Image: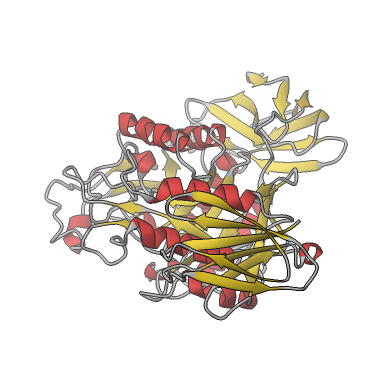
Amino acid sequence: MNEFTYQNTVERWCVFEATVESPSDKNPFIDYNIKGVFQGKNERVEVDGFYDGEGKYKVRFMPSFEGDYTFQIYGNFIDKPYRGNFTVTPASETNHGPVRVANTYHFAYEDGTPYYSIGTTCYAWTHQKPELQEKTLETLKNSPFNKIRFCIFPKHYVYNFNEPFTYPYEGTPCDSSCLTRDNFMDPKIFEGNDWDFKRFNPRHFQHIEKRIQDLMDLGIEADLIVMHPYDRWGFSKMKPEEDDLYWKYVIARFSAYRNVWWSLANEYDLMKEKTSQDWERYASIICEKDPYNHLRSIHNCTNIYDFTRPWVTHCSIQRVDVYKTAELVDEWRQRYKKPVVLDEICYEGNIEHGWGNISGQELVRRFWEAACRGGYAGHGETYAHPEDILWWSHGGDLHGESPERFKFLHKILCEVPGHGLRRHYLSWDSVTGVPESMTYYGDYYLDYYGFNRPDFRTFHFDETTKYQVDIIDTWNMTIRDAGVHQGKFTIKLPGREYMAIRIRKV
């Protein structure tokens, strides 16, 4: 009888794990399989397991309900199914479950708590040296970010030529000692890779899931970029059967973590060897193999994906115009009828590239513009560094001015009645957010002026309703009580950029 271990209790929406130890004389990633069937009062879930190295096969499960569960473990190397039972305890105070789409254009945790995305991008932070990764976690702990985008595969691009902390497959990489900013796209550099794409390196994936758990402990969603084109190791050019094996392995390992989001790719349209049929096939694997229905999307470079596809839960968009970014949220909401997340709208920084050198003020403006239109913007930071340690890729420290302002915005969003904002045309020269729900129609207005700087604004809703008015300085992060008004009233402003007026029915 093989050794069989599992835990007796697990918190709701946390990871239950059962382990079977067995020989792995063949290729345990393709010659052996394992799966689990979990039964509670309110759900029956079947999940694939995976090989975790050193003769250990694991099955993971995320229970959605409290109470008692039973389970059975099957496998082609198991003569008689393993059976067990465990108890699911109530969720802790900070555990609200997975994030779901809510109110068509917005998000909420599974327990109903609204989720307002304040995301950041840090592509290769899990592939850096351990001390830099720990520094990144410490920075995130004190940041406003509740979502972070990062890659499962290592990344090869400017400012990021170092070898990763681990590799996802058994084998050896090409020689990168001669890499420079001038030759980093030379095909000859990529010669010399020798990987077995049918034998994963469990250590690489153990490390990724540890960081997913670290993020979960901080209350941060892990937006996993499963594929990307910035590659010198050959991981972006695997055969279809190798891609599918990778997808199934990743889903089996990571889907039981409640904070996982699936991003099929970063800049999918730069992966010229992949077709639309490939992307749809990967999506079908997620829909089949992920029983928890985690959020799913795909990210563009220049060609926006067809987000009307039924498997897509939300739009993950990179700007497609140098100047217009958040200004297009209205159009995308109307076209796709899904949450609009602008995961890349240019980064705060000062490097030479146009995607990484706007000011903190401009990035904050884009966040407010998106929020008042009913969308969600994403942060990145690319300040030049003597050791090329840029947050957008490596993590480490934040140097910009925008993150504290995002914390201020998030607090204001959390105070919106109902769930989420939508655009309302209160005037032609401002962007006004009102509650998405018609239940609160006329109760709340968030009137934002961006780079305009009016000296005063005049309002008139009706003659009888009283409104509490606040003047918000979105850059200096202040809220000034402007009193209670009714009928036609005028609010004096300081004539500065980045101001807003909040009007709430008394």
Q: Residue 461, how many percent across, how many down?
A: 72, 73
The answer to whether residue 397 is visible is yes
Query: Residue at the location (15% across, 57% down)?
Result: 181
Nearer to the camera, 86 or 425: 425
Q: Is residue 82 left or right of residue 188?
A: right
Nearer to the camera, 16 or 384: 384
Q: Residue 240, how many percent across, how many down?
A: 48, 61
Q: Is residue 146 left or right of residue 345?
A: right
Query: Residue at the location (47% across, 25% down)?
Result: 54
Quadrant including the C terminus: bottom right
Q: Residue furthest right?
A: 41
Q: Is residue 112 above or below residue 351?
A: above
Query: Residue at the location (49% across, 45% down)?
Result: 145
Q: Quadrant of residue 22?
A: top right
Q: Residue furthest bottom?
A: 428
Nearer to the camera, 407 or 398: 407
For the image, the number of numbered tags is 0
The answer to whether residue 290 is visible is no
Q: Is residue 242 left or right of residue 196?
A: right
Quadrant including the N terminus: top right
Q: Quadrant of residue 163?
A: top left
Query: Residue at the location (77% across, 31% down)?
Result: 71
Q: Residue 469, how many percent across, how many down?
A: 64, 58
Q: Residue 386, how many percent across, how many down?
A: 16, 44
